[in-house]
Amino acid sequence: MNRLADISYLRLTIGYIVHTFGAVCDKPFASCVTFTSIATKLEEVTQGSLFVPPPPMFEEEELLKAQDIGAYAIGLEKSEEKTERSLDIPIIYMDNWRENLGLIASFLLADPSLKMAMFACFSMDSKGVAPILASLLHILGNPVCLIDCDNSSILGRPLELSYPLDAVDLQKVEAQAVEEGASAMVISANPSTLSRLALTGTHIDVCTGNKVLNLVTKPGSSQTLRPQEEPLYGAVFDNSTRIVAHTLDPLEVLDKDVFNQLIDVVPMGKAAVRTAISMALSAGITTASIRKAISISEDFQKSLADLEKEKGEPEESHDKDKS
């Protein structure tokens, strides 16, 4: 898919932000000003950027530098509206910039999360699932992007990122992954990797983690997960989002028959392995495909060997008559 063709009709303007998010611009005549990027850090500002510094840690000098570098406008909280500024570029005042930044970035970048299968492993209790799931999807033939503070990569190429990622950072990585041909993204959604509300504007297809299970009664029910919940980092969920329990017996997915088909090729006593397989199955991958790929993949066996070296997750005994 041609990225230029993708974004050619998406014009992020001051007028769009004002009308969509209830913002106020100090220069109403500038409603047609169009942005080419969003920056939340001064070093990220380029010609045509909308610069939204993290409140309240900014100074007039920082805003002037952003203007000199080429920012087309500054985004500040409405509480700053009465403060006199010596800027020539427009200032957009809005409540809750942090809650809306991911949505604005997603619009600018043409909703990149909708172009990939999105997997999220919430909280530190399921952190070990993400690299195993990424490895599994890779050997199944899917170009994968992994977002994890210890090992982020796109199609196996390491990414140099500054953690924790905010919503704009993550949207940019998602767009980059789409541009490089990734068909799936696996995210370790924990405080070391993501900042608060970093998943705002990101649509999740399959997720796991105890904090997710605490917010729902049954997967697929009409009661959807609420993006405002901080443990979920503002992620977008709907009735199609599949939820997999991070336990030794993943919820309603890894049943007795599946267990018996895979028990001789993977160490099923490992909760992280079982959960990763359950997430893959929830995405529509067949048991036969998983079995064939795992049985011939040295990469996956190596990743499991690395998992064995980690402390804190004991091996559980099992036999073919137990699920």
Image (cartoon, rainbow, N blue to C red):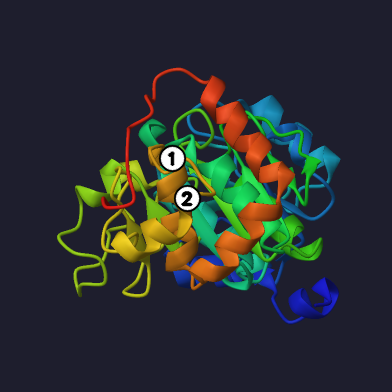
Label 1: few (<14), some or many (≥20) within 10 Å? many
Answer left or right for 222 relative to 295: left
Q: Which of 288 and 183 lies nearest the eye of the viewer?
A: 288
Residue under label 2: 276
Q: Identify the residue at horizontal 34%, vertical 59% (top origin).
A: 254
Asked if one can make out residue 181 in the rendered structure from this viewpoint, the answer is yes
Residue 313, percent from left and from top: 39, 25
Answer left or right for 281 relative to 154: left
- As drawn, the residue found furthest toward the left would be 217
**Of the numbered discs in the image, which one, if any, rests on residue 78?**
none
Name the quadrant containing residue 237: bottom left
**Number of dots carrying numbers:** 2
Residue 160, percent from left and from top: 76, 33
Above or below, 168 against 194 in this view is below
Residue 183, percent from left and from top: 68, 66
Q: How far apart are marks 1 and 2 (CA)?
A: 6 Å
Q: Which of 136 and 213 lies nearest the eye of the viewer?
A: 136
Asked if one can make out residue 91 in the rendered structure from this viewpoint, the answer is no
Label 2: few (<14), some or many (≥20) within 10 Å? many
**Of the numbered discs in the image, which one, if any, rests on residue 272?**
1
Q: Identify the residue at horizontal 63%, vertical 28% (top origin).
A: 150
Residue 80, percent from left and from top: 46, 39
Q: Identify the residue at horizontal 37%, vertical 24% (top origin).
A: 314
* Amino acid carrying mark 2 in the image: Ala
Q: Which secondary structure, mark 2?
A: helix
Q: Which secondary structure, mark 1?
A: helix
For the N terminus, the image quarter is bottom right
Q: Identify the residue at horizontal 44%, vertical 61% (top origin).
A: 261
Q: Which of 237 and 259 lies nearest the eye of the viewer?
A: 259
* Amino acid carrying mark 1 in the image: Ala
Contact (Cβ within 8 Å) of mark 1 with mark 2: yes
Above or below, 172 against 11 in this view is above
